[in-house]
Amino acid sequence: MASVQKREIAPSVSVTQPARKRQRWIGYLFILPWFVSMIWFDAIPFGMNLYLGMTDYSVGPIEQANWIGLENFERMLDDDLFRQSLANTIYYIVFSVPLTLILAFSIALLLNTRIRFLGLFRTVYYIPSIIPVVAASIIFLWMFNARAGAINQILYAIGIDPIRWLTNPDYTKITLVIISLWGFGAQMIVFLAALQGIPEQLYEAVAIDGGGLRARLRHIVIPLMTPTIFFNLLVGLIASFQVFTTAYIILGPNGGPLQSGLFYMMHTYNNAFRYFEMGYASAMSFVLFLIILAFTLLMIWTSNRWVYYGDE
Amino acid sequence: MKEKLVFLGLALIVMLSPVVSPPARAQAQGPDCAGGQEVTITFMNWWGATREPLMNQVIANFNEICPNITVVNAVQSWDGREQLVATAVASNEPPNLIMTSRTETYQFAYQGLIEPIGSFVEASGIDPWSIFYESEIGNQVFDGELYTMPLPTAGGISGLYLYNKEMFRQAGLDPDDPPETWQELEAATAAMTELDAFGIAKLGANILLVNDLSSSFVYWLYTNDGQLYSDDGRTVLFNSPQGVETLEWMVNFVNEYSDGLEAVRDFMAGAPDLTTADFPLFNELLAIEFVNVSAFGHLENTDPEMWADPEMWGVALRPYNADNPNAKSAGVSGLAFSWGYTIPVNQPQETKDAAYAFLEFLATAVDGGCYFLFEQGRPSPVMACNEDPAYYDANPYWDVVLESLEIDVSVSITPVQGQINDILSRAVEEAFYGADAQTVLDRAAEEAQALLDEFWSES
Amino acid sequence: MNMIENRRIRLLRQTTIYLTLIAGSLVVFFPLVWTISTSLKTPEQVTVREVQLIPDPVAWENYVDIFDLVPVWRFLKNTLVIASASVFGGLVTCSLAGYAFARILFPGQRVLFFILLATMMLPYVVQLIPIFVIFDRLGWVGTFRPLTVPRLLGHNAFYIFLYRQFFRGLPSELFDAARIDGCTEVGLWWRIAMPNSKPVAAAVGIFAFQFAWTDFLSPLIYLGSKQEMWTIALGLNGLKGFEGMGSTLPMMMVMSIFMIVPMLVIFAFGQKYMVQGVTVSGLKG
């Protein structure tokens, strides 16, 4: 009797309860392959790195490393380059992450309009992402060359004195930020995919209300894209903290004039592979992990204010 | 009478034959080719795709003597080299023979990762000290043990400069009387440098390796009777009065005659190497450039017209400081690269034997290393190879090249040299940006000395 | 009056869009032009300080000679093996995991998701050595396994995170309706989640292919000594010497073109799925 009543009053409860038990088990199965790979290729190496960070490991079989406790971390406090490289990295992030995002978003919007040859245009804008580093680096080195490079030649033609993009310590980071914009492709693709999830009716509704493009943007596109913007910002932030290959190729392993382009990961790399101080490098990378973690938590915590998940 | 003459003639020939016999050929047989067993060894090297055919020929020549040893020529790309080497030596199955720079050789020797070759050499019966130039083989000794043999030369990288005779003529200078002293160099540069709105239009002399200021400084230091370290490698000496004088001279030279460090870097920028057609020296835009001995091969390949005409280009020794009575032209050996081929300990004895057999052939044999380097127009670390008359035919300035090898001095380095290089580079750079030379050198010396002390106390 | 004005506004907007896109295209297209131009030069024509776009004479034979210099087909085949594993992992394993994080409630889901995010923050440069050591002790160095197995297992937090965001954005009613009909979770994934996420799947497919195609460091340290197993990225860089690159630059650019073309094809194909209407356009009620 009671059970019949229960079913009538609250049908959802009894119908989904056994289903929830089924859900739990399946969930683990879905993530099992990733979980296994995570243990082997993330967790264990992370543990090893943490251990190595407290040894004097230099090179060769890791069994030869000797325990030295927190010495590596103490050393970081005295290391001028630790501070300088961190400052350089933060400067870079502050400019590169938002600018790349805005660029990628704008281009994605343009490539989402109803124009002819859309597929062709989209493919053309994908090209910067796939130019091999070898070719791209030569092109950038030429482009920013103070004497014969395209940028200075154009500036000179409009009356601006040549700027020493790559040799003046005050300009190297800006140059690297500009070069980083070249990597807008990945974020553009994510935005393009996400834009397709905005229902047509919403655009129509705005049009009926008499709103133009700007209204569409403000009231429909941007609010609905906040989860994707959040995603790209987060991923962009995490990636930017680890940037160094471009700077390495363009400015050299020491970050160029007065080490103005020495990023944190470059300093870590130098210690790991050029000074044979792998233990110290491991300690440095652990510190970077903590810093990224802190920034990420901050981002997630503040995201509740501006990210709008349509489903919630 | 006639028989006496014939006898005398024969005796003469017999007596003179050791003098005119071909250059001493090392015992390429080696330790009897690893006992004759069938072995395969992996030879990890960075000679690159352009020299792969040459290396394959060397291996083929080796196989004529040791057909039982298969050598896999594992040529690698230059990018990612440091990471590849680090993982290779961390492996349980490292390559059997690895091409390592001197710092790496010393670091791996210090960590006990590579095999000293003293016993192999003894078993083979050769005497490396009589085969190689002293500084060349000395560079491959760490803590009293020999770990490898050199190829190419560690020397011949700093003692020479290449100059464009045409530009000399245009400026009214005598193309056959290139600068020999710092002071003459200044005068020549002043005469040949022109500036424009973008910086330097024509540069007389580029005295720097723009991306490696520490090496630039050290090379000039030795032409001012200065030293990087004491002979035992334990004390820093580069902040001596000679060092300060050298640095001040360098900074003044660049500021006075070429509009500052940034202008020079911009002028030389963009893959500044001798393998591109727009390298300034080939286009009458740069008159003097300090090169290493690989330059001749590059010159031949990139600008064959210039190479073929000795009236267009010349070679001379690095100038020394005429104001310093003790100074003379000198080169520095063993600071950069200084390649050797090391044998990781983590492998079975047969492959070690085979690796050594190939190493010895590669480094000492006439149709091994000598052939390999001759084809590139470079001198060999083996003394006898450099007397090959064919070199003289190919390169009109060959005796200058040999002279530069004679004036090379070996630097005592330690495994921490990589870090010291960066510290010194930063100090030199700060001087170019206006800092006081004595202050920056003292500070760099302090840091470097601390690193050296730490190293020596632990070993 | 209104209609003519509307049409004029629309025409203006369209023209602006076209002009902007075309102007930008010239900028982004330039590197490809430079690459093609350099690939058709002979070594003496290589310049890095100036730009001379039309080589004289044009070295068409570079595209034939490259096959004598580099075993292009073998490298392409090797790269395809790795790329297939990467794409499969991206489209299947990562998608399943992303779906679970988005749509299945299981204990510890939040913690595990956070761990997922955390794995993206591990600096890879230093992770390199421990990961190598693990593979070395397993005996997998010198095989394709270090490059394929993690991908097949879905070891890519970025894709999983991406899927999770998208699956969360789909209307719950879709899933609830099917669930009531007795659909299994796998069925929900296959029949509801995936078909409504073609743009995301296309994006992940593009990324997975691109990454496997261009990855240099991992193939280098795991396949370095075995040239017959090299990928084209290794083949490309293998042409670079340590004393200047002028002489091999044209050939390197030929290899670059071989690398670029397949990626452009995959992208052109994938972006077709990034159109309106392949995601659910709202359910009423």
Image (spheres, coloured by chain):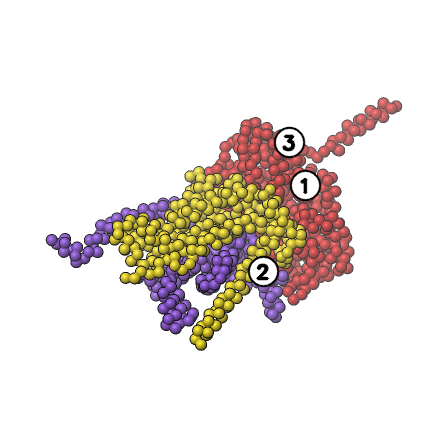
> Mark 1 — on which chain does it sit?
B
Please identify which colour was used for chain B in the image. Answer: red
Q: Nearer the viewer, residue C130 or B157?
A: C130
Asked whether the beta carbons under mark 1 and mark 3 sit within 8 Å of each other, the answer is: no
- How crowded pointer 3 is (Cα within 10 Å; few <14, some 14-19, many 20+) is rated as some
Tag 2 secondary structure: helix
Amino acid type of the residue tagged 1 in the rendering: Phe
Q: Is C187 situated left or right of B177 in this image?
A: left
Distance from label 2 to label 1 (Cα)? 38 Å
Amino acid type of the residue tagged 3 in the rendering: Gln
Q: Position of residue A49 (x, y in %)?
A: 42, 48
Amino acid type of the residue tagged 2 in the rendering: Met
Farthest residue, direction right: B1
> Mark 2 — on which chain does it sit?
A
In this rendering, the answer to whether B277 lies above or below C77 is: below
Q: Which of disc 3 and disc 1 is earlier in sequence?
A: 3
Tag 1 secondary structure: helix
Asked whether the beta carbons under mark 2 and mark 1 sit within 8 Å of each other, the answer is: no
Residue located 33% across and 62% down the image: A310
Q: Which residue is mark 1?
A: B374
Q: Which residue is mark 2?
A: A143
> Mark 3 — on which chain does it sit?
B
Q: Quick one: which chain is purple?
A: A
Whether residue C216 is visible, yes or no, is: yes
Front position among marks 2 and 3: 2
